[in-house]
Amino acid sequence: MSRRAAGAGRVAHRPRRLTVALAERSYPVELGAGTLAGVGAAVARRTGASRVALVTVPGVGRRYAARVLRSLRAAGLRASRIDVPDGDASKSLGQVKRLYEAFLDLGLDRGSAVVALGGGMVGDLAGFAAATYLRGLPFVQIPTTLLAMVDASIGGKVAVNLRRGKNLVGAFHQPRLVWIDVETLASLPARERAAGFAEVVKAAALWDAGFFAGLERHAEALRELEIRRLLPTLERACAIKAEVVEQDERESGLRMLLNLGHTLGHAVETLRGYRGILHGEAVSMGMVYAARRSEQLELAPAGTAERLEALLVRFGLPTQLPWFPRRAYLEALRVDKKSRDSRIRYIVLRRIGRAEVVELTPAQILPASWGRRRRPGRRTRGAP
Ligand SMILES: NC(=O)c1ccc[n+]([C@@H]2O[C@H](COP(=O)([O-])OP(=O)(O)OC[C@H]3O[C@@H](n4cnc5c(N)ncnc54)[C@H](O)[C@@H]3O)[C@@H](O)[C@H]2O)c1
Ligand SMILES: [Zn+2]
């Protein structure tokens, strides 16, 4: 965090609130700097619970759990911390079962709530446990990664992985409250930070050209987590996610736009075996590819991809798809493994600020010219 940002304790930054409007499932997203110690009363008010399980990972809990627990207790709640091991491998049915057992040990009943403190992994896992334990307990998100703040904590999708794929078992379980303290980002590794900005850029690219221009104006300050810039930026990114979710809670149409960059992004993650690449990095590559392909298909004006790429680079993100044989990409893209030609709902850009779904086959997404152009070391290959 920059010096200016570190001064947030002295300079008061107006907290912001937005609402995810989903009729009786509506909830506030509270954004602030240095607000962690104030979460307790809001949890009590929004959940009506008397007992709370705070689920976190050791690295995050060590830094922030004490403040949250103190605040919960000060608000009259009986609160206990439960740690799960760090890493996406913890998004498993095995860990869900461990959480159920821990909930039982703590005596969590219908008058209890689950609070997730951490990144998207903790939110998805604790949220899934909250959605299913006793057929559903009130749930609160305290996201501590940028990605979780602007993406995973809003929208109510909770899930765990199976060995054969990510997020294959899940539910829709909207939180009662999302509490964002941007000061927690100070301890987030730079690479994780950049990966979070990929989803911020994505939100701007698919929804709001003015917001995109704002990111272009302030990319370096944002990278430095300058709170004066960061708070309104997160507010807008959260609001975009909220708007999309409000219009399509169950992902039947519009919400698909949030998958901009994710088709190829997921393919890259799969081909890399989820090793050595962060989700946001893969999305960054997939987005630039989608923009380029949109230009080739004459759906977006020339220069769209270049502008998008330039911004992502300023956030420290990679933008080139790693080389794998074209057939490996096609295989990874095939949702219906039995049919080569089944169409994929691919998100294209019409321009900066506007995305659209088109149905394309994997071979249309990655035309034959792609493999020829990108193969590295081609000229020297086969040389003695
Ligand atoms: N539900 C949704 O809509 C949705 C959307 C996007 C992603 N996701 C899920 O979110 C997960 C990815 O989330 P993520 O990127 O936050 O990963 P993560 O939760 O694994 O966190 C990344 C790393 O940062 C550490 N960390 C978290 N907060 C920190 C802090 N403040 N300071 C220092 N270290 C900190 C974590 O311990 C972890 O090592 C994936 O499981 C993905 O499937 C869900
Ligand atoms: Zn994503």
Image (cartoon, helix red, strand yellow):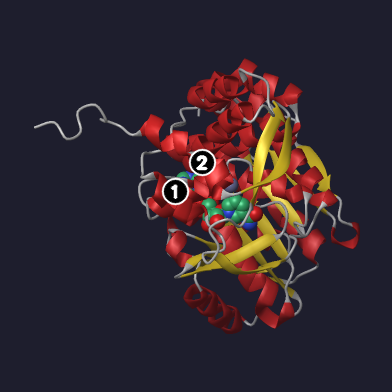
Left or right of 139 on screen, residue 384:
left
The quadrant in which the C terminus is found is top left
Tell me: residue 313, above or below residue 72: above
Indicate the position of residue 226 as horizontal and vertical percent values: 58, 24
- Which residue is at 47% across, 31% downward? 319
As rendered, which of 25 and 285 lies closer to the eye? 285
Instruction: Kindly report the distance in space between the C-alpha atoms of the residues bearing marks 2 and 1.
Output: 8 Å
Q: Earlier in the sequence, mark 2 or mark 1?
A: 1
| Residue 138 percent location from the top left of the image | 74, 68
The residue identified by callout 2 is: 366
Query: For numbered disc 2, what is the local secondary structure?
Result: loop
Image spot of residue 57 (x, y percent): 47, 59
Decide which of 366, 258 is in the foreground and name it. Answer: 366
Q: Residue furthest right?
A: 23
Question: Hey, what amino acid is under mark 2?
Answer: Leu
Residue 36 place in picture, x, y as percent: 64, 47
Which label sits on residue 184? none
Q: Check whether the beta carbons of the residues at disc 2 and disc 1 lie within 8 A of each other.
A: yes
| Image vertical order of residue 2 relative to residue 284, above or below | above
Q: Residue at x 35, y 46 (%)?
A: 276
| Mark number displayed over residue 329 | 1
Q: Is residue 212 visible?
A: yes
Tell me the amino acid under the disc marked 1. Answer: Tyr
Residue depicted at x 63% and y 69%: 170
